[in-house]
Amino acid sequence: MSYLVLARKYRPQTFEQVVGQAHITQTLQNAIQADRVAHALLFAGPRGIGKTSVARIFAKAMSCKEGPTPTPCNACTSCREITDGIAVDVFEIDGASNRGIDEVREIRENVKYMPGYSRYKIYIIDEVHMLTKEAFNALLKTLEEPPAHVLFVFATTEAHKIPVTILSRCQRHDFRRIGLEDILEHLRSICQDTSLEISEDSLRLLAKEADGSMRDALSLLDQVMAYSEGVATDDQVLDILGALNRNMIFDLSSALLTHDLVKALNLLDEVYKRGHDLKRLLIQLVEHFRHLLIVKMGHGASTLVDVPAHELTSMQKQVEGISSESINQVFTTLFQAEPGIRFSPQPKLSLEMHFIKLAQLKPVASFDEIIKKLDHLAKKIEPDYGITQTKEVRQEMQAITAQPTEHTTEPEQEPALSENLAQTWQQLLDVFSKRYPALIPNLEKATLTKIGKDFFEITVTGNSFYTARLRDKKSMVALQEVCDQFFGRKMKIKIVESGKGVSRKKGKPKESDKAKRLKKEALSHPLVTDALDVFNGKVVDVKIL
């Protein structure tokens, strides 16, 4: 057939035409110019990025009539024969089909002879990592000290499989994946040269599908040209690639972020009925959420997200009001699901299962939002005695202490107080539970045993831990403040310890009733309710010490 595919027709013929490998082509040109060319070169890198093309250009540069020159003429006999692949002094060997020791022995024998009419005999061995261990060992001596008229150029996609003894005898050049913009620019120039009408978005999609490989990009463009007959629409390109419309990806991702399970499942079913590959859909979703996460993290996303400007704007709108933690939650779940869905006999069911899992996940509040709520809570609540006390509690306390009760009587009424110590103590506990709830577990281990004109006595039962807690400085300040306000005069507080314990006075509420009351007060405390609201939590249990 006379037709040449684009990958062959537009194969670079000079170092300047090589796309995306300037760090290598410049090095080789400088080495040729300075006559510092190594006798063995190793070109390593992914597929379709120009390793063999550069090897051929290098062979032309060394064999050109005007050379050795960094700019071969492509007009002399040597250049034309190398371009056509018929040069007698340039040997292109497939390492996969010539991998044995016998083939290497043949090379060893042939290198002894001078080239036919070129300056050098050049051996280009593609996929050199496919050679056997014995073949590599047989090549060692020749590779280390070849005749002056012999040059070796090795190309491989898996340099790690080459023995270290071979690597140490070669000058290694690592080829890079070609950038998206470089591929896009090259495809654009070819479309102009071939008069193909195609949109910028479709060209970008082709370049993206190539994944850094120029050969893959040209093969895809060749397929589009054959299908479109001069004008390639976006739908035609999507059909050829088997890719989804970007609007579908945006709609599906929005449904997952908003936990709209019904919409997500309907969109998935629509994709399935159209015959699209669900594994490919998952890959596109993972990539999309990766872009969303980067966009959410701040400025400078355009350098890390290879999408058109209008898509970048749409992504910025999509992540408004959504925390980066929520996006990362979806991204991580889908990424971890990829291996299972890839090997699942029912990928649609497996993908539906993960969509249901994502819908059941609760939105994750960002750390900044939590800190902001905690700061707001801290402003509402004032620190006191190692815990917090709200304004509402202080107002209730003032209302309680402001009301005329039998406890704010004159000293001559204290016999009545002495006769009802249990009731007085219970009322004091009610005040402490509102103002200083942290003291309640210690005060419950005590009883009011005596009240005088200017003093009252508290007897603590149980071990000395509770006595020590009540006698510390902060506790005494709290006790003094409440008791002075409660009795309406300055009171001296005496705390004694009862080793054997003092029995509760008659009339004290039952333990079960007290536990219920304390649990109710704890659950209704403003600090607890605010904390539950900030962290979206729930109370599992309340322990009464």
Image (tube, rainbow, N blue to C red):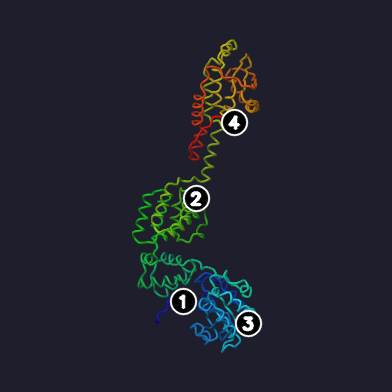
Q: CA distance from mark 1 to mark 3?
A: 34 Å
- Three-letter amino acid code at disc 1? Tyr
In terms of secondary structure, where does tag 3 sit?
loop
Camera-side mark, 1 or 3: 3
How packed is label 4: few (under 14 Cα within 10 Å), some, or many (20 or more)? few
Along the polypeptide, which appears first: circle 1 or circle 3? Answer: 1
Along the polypeptide, which appears first: circle 1 or circle 4? Answer: 1
Along the polypeptide, which appears first: circle 2 or circle 3? Answer: 3
Instruction: Determine which residue is flagged by label 4.
Output: 384
Q: Nearer the viewer, residue 269 or 300?
A: 269
In terms of secondary structure, where does tag 1 sit?
loop
In terms of secondary structure, where does tag 4 sit?
strand
Q: Are marks 2 and 4 in contact (CB under 8 Å)?
A: no
Residue 507 screen position, x and y as percent: 52, 17
Residue 54 screen position, x and y as percent: 54, 76
Camera-side mark, 3 or 4: 3
Residue 542 screen position, x and y as percent: 51, 32
- Asked which quadrant contains residue 148, the reply is bottom right
Instruction: Determine which residue is flagged by label 1.
Output: 10
Camera-side mark, 2 or 3: 3
The number of discs equals: 4
Instruction: Determine which residue is flagged by label 3.
Output: 146
Q: CA distance from mark 1 to mark 4?
A: 79 Å
Q: CA distance from mark 1 to mark 2?
A: 44 Å
Q: CA distance from mark 2 to mark 3?
A: 59 Å
Along the polypeptide, which appears first: circle 1 or circle 2? Answer: 1
The residue at 37%/61% (across/down) is 276
In terms of secondary structure, where does tag 2 sit?
helix
